[in-house]
C-alpha cells in the first residue's frame, strides 16, 4: 500500500497544507511508505461546515437508510482485504490474528449498530395524549423522541486501530443516530485510517448520502484538537485515549461559549480483589489467568488489570509463584509505537526504583528496543505502602501490574477506598465468601462501570448490557458508555412536540406508529397505534 | 410565621456562623420577620459528608421506600397549610392562587416521581445472557442497570419558590433515584425554604431514612456555590436560574479535578413564529393570547415568549392592535424581588432607548416601584435590525417581548438563524401553511427542546413526554430535561455486572425478576423471568 497522505473533506481527497509526517513502524523502527499532510484550520473548518450542512438531511433519513450506510461501511472494510490488515500490522505492531479479530469486532459492531438504526428503538418515543377536559386547564398533546445532536468529532485511539478508530464505536454510534462525523485520524496509524476513511466515503456515495456526513483529517491532536473541539458546528466529541489528552479536550469543550458534551474514555487501573477462599483453593490458576490478562496485547487495553488486592494467607504464595513463572515464560511483545514504549519503560523504571516496591515477576527474555518491546513487570507492595503513597495509583499503560498485600480485610478496604473512578473492578471469590461480600460488591459498584466476578476484565462485549465508562477519571461522564448499543445515547437529545399536526410529526410519534416501535403511552410501553 | 433562620444539616437545625441576612418583601419593601444565618464552609462540608455517608444506604433502599419518602414529603408540605402559602406570598410577591397552584404542581410532581420510584422502570435493566458455546470465546453473562450517581446539590430558582426550589423537580428527581440531596436555599425565599426543608426532614424521619439524605443550607450562591460545587462528595448539580449563575456553576464543576455533571436550566428567548395565514385569519386572537402569555406571572417564566417573528401582510395590524390594547389594560404586577425588578427596569430602559426600537405596547398604569412592579413592554423592530444587532437577542426576564417584522420569509429565516439554543419554539399557522412548513419545523426542532403549535409556550406539563431543556444557553446539557419523569435520568449512571452470582445482583437484574419490570433481554423488551 502506498498511502496518499491526504485528508477526506466531504467526500473529496484534499492535501493538507500543514506540516508533513511519516510513521515509524514499531516492528523494526523503519519508516513506512506514505507522507501524511496535516490539515490546516481552513480545511478543518471546511469539514465541519460540510457536516453542519449535511446534518439536517442526514437527521431526516430513515433508520433503514442509516442501517444500509453502516452495512455498506462494513462491506467496504471487508473488501479492503489484506491490504488493511497488513498496513495496520506495520503501523501498530499488533499481530495479524489480533487485527483480524479486531476487524471482525469492528464490522460486527457496525452491523449491530445498523440493526439499532433500522429498529429505531433507541429513539425512546413517548406520547402523552391530550385531555381537553382536564381541570383547571386542558392537557395538551405532548410527544417526545430523541434526535441526533449534530456533528460529532471523533478522536481515534492508538490501541484499537480499527475498533476504536475511524470506523470504530464512536463513529458507528454517531452515524447510527444520524449525526455527521469528522474523525481526527490517529497519527500512529494514518495509513490504516486512510483506508478505512476511503471505505466510509465510498459507502456514503453508494447509499446516496450527502458528502458532508463524513470527513477525516490528518494531523496531531495538539494542532487539530483545539480547532475541532472549539468549532461552532461541533456538537459533541468522542475520544478514547490518555487522561491527559482526554482532559485537554474536555477542558476545551467546557470553555466554549456554548459548552458541548465530551465522552472521553481515558483508561483505568482496573483493580482486582482476591478473596482469601479463592486464593486458598485456586491461587495458582488465578495467578496464571491474571498473568495472561496483563500481558495480553502487551497490556495495551484500557481494561488491563493493573492492581491486585490480596490478603496474606493460604495460597497467596501459590498465586505469586504462578504469576512469576507464567510471566517469566512470556516473550515481550511490540508496543504500539515508540512513544508508548519509551513512556512505558520510563514509568516502569521510576516506579521500580521506589524503595517500597519489590519485583514479583518479569520476563526471562529481555525486551528488544529495536522491536519497540515493553517488558512485562509485576511489582509487590504492602497495603500500607499503597495507602501512604499515591505513586502506585496511576495507570501504567502496558504489561504492568502491582500486587498489593494487606494483613487483613480492614486494611484492604482502606486501600480500596483510595481508588478513584474505574472502568472495571473484579472480584475473585468462592461461592460462600462472595455471598457475604455484599458491602465489597457495593463499594466496587460505586467506583466502577463494570463489576466482574471470577474472570479477567480484558475482553469487552459489544452488546446491549455492556457498560464501558465509569466515574472520573475512567471517563468524563459516568452516565454514558462508549461500548455496546447504549453508546448511541451519547449523541442524541430529546425534542418534544406539543399539539403538532400528524403530518409534521416524525414517523416515530405519529398515531399510526408506522415504525412499529414500542413507545411509552402515558408512561406505559406499547407498540399499538393510537386511535 | 417566625423563621428560625437556621440550616438543616443531616436532620439537625444548625445556626450558620456566616453573615446574617433578612428578606425585603417585594410587595411593600418591608423587612420580613426572620434573620437567616449563612452556613460556613465547615457546615457545608458536614452536609456533604453526611450525604456521602447516607448514599450507600439510600442507594440500596427499595423503590417502594423511596416512593413512601416522596409521598410523605408531599403530605408534610400539604400539612404546612396556609403558613407556607402566606410566607411564600410575602417573600415572592406571587399571588395566592398562583402559589396554591404551584403547591399543587409540586406535590403532584412528588407523587408522580413516587410512582416512578415504586415502578423501578427508570433503571433500564438489561440482560445479555451467557453463551458458553460461542466461538472463538464463550460469551459471559452481562447485566446492566442504572444506579444513583451520588449526592446531588440543588440550587433553587427564585421564580418557583415551591416547584423549582427545596422540594422541586431537581430534589424529587434525585431522591426518587436514591441520591441524597443538599439544597442551597434561595436567598429570596429562605423562610419558604425553611418550611419545606422541615417537611422533608420530618418525612425522612417518618420513613426511617438516614438523616444525611437531605440537608439545606442558607446563604448566597456566590459564597456557598463554590463550596458546594467543588466538594469532593458532590456528584452532580441541578440548577434553575440565570445564565450567568448557571454558567458559573458549570465552570466550577468542569474545573474540578474530577468534573461532575451539571444540569443548569438557564432560560430562553422562546421565539414564536407567526405564519401569514394564521395572522391573516386570527391575528387579533393570537395577539391577545401572546399579550397574556408574556405578562402571566409578571413574565417571570423561563418559557415566556420573548420574540415574535412575523412577516408584513394582512392581519398584522390587527395582531399589533390586539397586543397593544390587551397590554394597555393590564395592571403591572409585583416582581419576585427588588433585584429582579431593578434589573428588569434597567434592561427595558436601555433596550427601549435603542434607535431602531419602537414601543408597540405597554400598560396604561405605571408600575409602582414601592410594590416592586415591572411594567410590561413590547417593542417592535425590523428583521434587518434584529439581524444586524445582537442587542435584541438576550433574554429580558420579565413581561417583555419584541416583535420582529420581516418583509418576507427568507428574511425571517435569516433572522431565525441568528438564534442560539432555546427551551421552546412556537409556530402559529393554519393547517395548509403548516403542512408546507416542514423545513421551518425542522429548523425550530434543531434549536429548541420543545416545539409548540398554535399555543403559548408558558405552561409546562409534568409528565413523561415533556422536554424542558435545550441546546446552550437554554441548558448546559441538551441531552436532559429538568421537568417530567425523564428528569430522573440526570442523576443516574449505568453499572454492568459480569457473571455475578444471583444473590449479589440487584433485584432488577435477578433471573426471577422480583420487581416485575420490563427488561431488555438480548435487546428485546420482556417482563418474563429468565429460566
Image (cartoon, coloured by chain):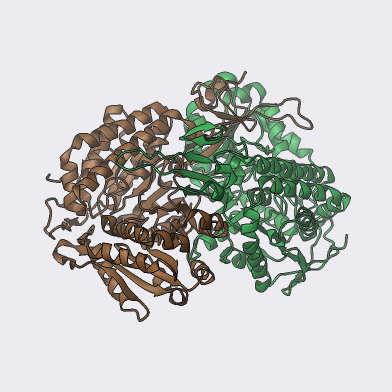
Chain colours: A brown, B green
| Residue B392 sits above or below residue A30 on the image | above
Point out residue B16 in the picture as x, y percentages from the top left corner. 74, 71
Q: Position of residue B451 (x, y in %)?
A: 58, 34
- Frontmost residue, B238 versus A46: B238
Residue B101, located in which quarter of the rendered image?
top right
Judge left or right: residue A98 versus residue B115.
left
Q: Is A431 rendered above or below residue B48?
A: above
Is residue A531 visible in the rendered image? The answer is yes
- Residue drawn at (58%, 64%), measured in percent from left and top? B233
**Along the horizontal axis of the image, is A156 left or right of A140?**
left
Residue B423 in picture, x, y percent from top left: 59, 42
Q: Please state which of residues B285 and A491 is positioned toward the viewer in this rendering.
A: A491
Q: Residue furthest bottom?
A: A355
| Looking at the image, residue B111 lies above or below residue A72 | below
Number of on-image labels: 0
When the figure is inspected, residue A315 is found, relative to residue B508, above or below; the finding is below
Left or right relative to A370: residue B426: right
Residue A5 drawn at (x, y percent): 18, 48
- The quarter of the picture where the N terminus of chain B appears is bottom right
Amino acid at each position: 500500500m502506498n498511502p496518499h497522505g491526504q485528508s477526506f473533506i466531504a467526500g473529496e481527497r484534499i492535501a493538507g497544507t500543514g506540516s508533513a509526517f511519516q510513521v515509524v513502524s514499531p516492528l523494526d523502527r523503519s519508516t513506512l511508505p506514505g507522507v501524511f499532510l496535516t490539515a490546516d484550520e481552513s480545511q478543518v473548518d471546511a469539514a465541519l461546515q460540510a457536516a453542519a450542512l449535511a446534518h439536517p438531511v442526514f437527521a431526516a433519513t430513515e433508520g433503514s437508510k442509516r442501517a444500509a450506510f453502516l452495512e455498506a461501511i462494513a462491506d467496504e472494510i471487508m473488501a479492503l482485504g489484506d491490504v488493511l490488515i497488513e498496513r495496520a500490522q506495520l503501523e501498530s505492531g499488533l499481530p495479524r490474528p489480533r487485527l483480524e479479530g479486531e476487524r471482525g469486532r469492528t464490522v460486527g459492531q457496525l452491523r449491530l449498530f445498523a440493526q439499532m438504526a433500522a429498529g429505531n428503538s433507541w429513539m425512546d418515543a413517548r406520547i402523552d395524549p391530550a385531555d381537553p377536559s382536564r381541570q383547571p386547564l386542558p392537557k395538551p398533546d405532548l410527544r417526545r423522541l430523541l434526535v441526533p445532536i449534530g456533528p460529532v468529532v471523533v478522536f481515534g485511539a492508538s490501541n484499537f486501530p480499527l475498533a476504536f478508530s475511524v470506523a470504530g464505536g464512536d463513529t458507528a454510534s454517531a452515524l447510527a443516530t444520524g449525526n455527521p462525523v469528522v474523525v481526527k485520524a490517529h497519527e500512529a496509524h494514518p495509513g490504516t485510517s486512510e483506508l478505512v476513511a476511503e471505505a466510509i466515503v465510498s459507502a456514503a456515495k453508494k447509499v446516496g448520502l450527502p458528502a458532508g456526513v463524513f470527513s477525516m483529517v490528518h494531523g496531531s491532536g495538539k494542532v487539530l484538537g483545539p480547532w475541532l473541539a472549539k468549532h461552532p458546528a461541533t456538537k459533541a466529541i468522542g475520544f478514547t485515549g490518555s487522561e491527559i489528552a482526554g482532559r485537554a479536550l474536555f477542558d476545551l469543550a467546557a470553555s466554549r461559549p456554548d459548552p458541548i458534551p465530551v465522552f472521553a474514555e481515558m483508561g483505568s487501573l482496573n483493580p482486582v480483589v482476591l478473596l482469601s477462599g479463592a486464593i486458598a483453593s485456586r491461587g495458582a490458576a488465578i495467578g496464571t489467568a491474571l498473568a495472561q490478562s496483563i500481558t495480553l496485547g502487551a497490556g495495551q487495553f484500557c481494561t488491563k488489570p493493573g492492581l491486585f488486592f490480596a490478603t496474606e494467607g493460604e495460597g497467596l504464595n501459590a498465586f505469586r509463584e504462578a504469576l512469576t513463572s507464567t510471566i517469566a515464560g512470556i516473550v515481550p511483545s511490540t508496543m504500539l509505537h515508540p512513544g508508548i514504549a519509551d513512556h512505558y519503560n520510563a514509568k516502569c523504571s521510576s516506579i521500580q526504583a521506589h524503595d517500597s516496591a519489590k519485583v514479583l515477576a518479569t520476563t526471562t527474555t529481555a525486551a528488544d528496543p529495536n522491536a519497540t518491546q515493553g517488558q512485562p513487570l509485576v511489582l509487590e507492595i504492602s497495603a500500607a505502602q499503597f495507602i501512604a503513597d499515591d505513586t502506585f495509583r496511576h495507570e501504567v499503560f502496558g504489561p504492568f501490574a502491582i500486587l498489593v498485600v494487606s494483613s487483613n480485610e480492614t486494611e484492604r478496604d482502606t486501600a480500596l477506598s483510595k481508588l478513584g473512578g474505574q472502568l472495571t473492578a473484579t472480584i475473585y471469590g468462592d461461592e460462600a465468601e462472595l455471598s457475604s461480600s455484599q458491602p465489597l460488591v457495593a463499594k466496587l459498584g460505586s467506583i466502577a462501570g463494570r463489576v466482574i466476578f471470577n474472570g479477567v476484565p480484558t475482553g469487552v462485549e459489544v452488546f446491549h448490557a455492556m457498560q464501558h465508562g465509569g466515574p472520573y477519571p475512567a471517563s468524563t461522564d459516568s452516565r454514558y458508555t462508549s461500548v455496546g448499543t447504549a453508546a448511541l445515547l451519547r449523541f442524541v437529545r430529546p425534542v418534544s412536540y406539543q399539539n403538532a399536526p400528524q403530518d409534521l410529526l416524525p414517523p416515530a410519534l405519529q398515531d399510526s406508529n408506522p415504525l412499529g416501535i414500542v413507545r411509552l403511552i402515558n408512561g406505559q410501553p406499547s407498540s399499538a397505534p393510537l386511535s
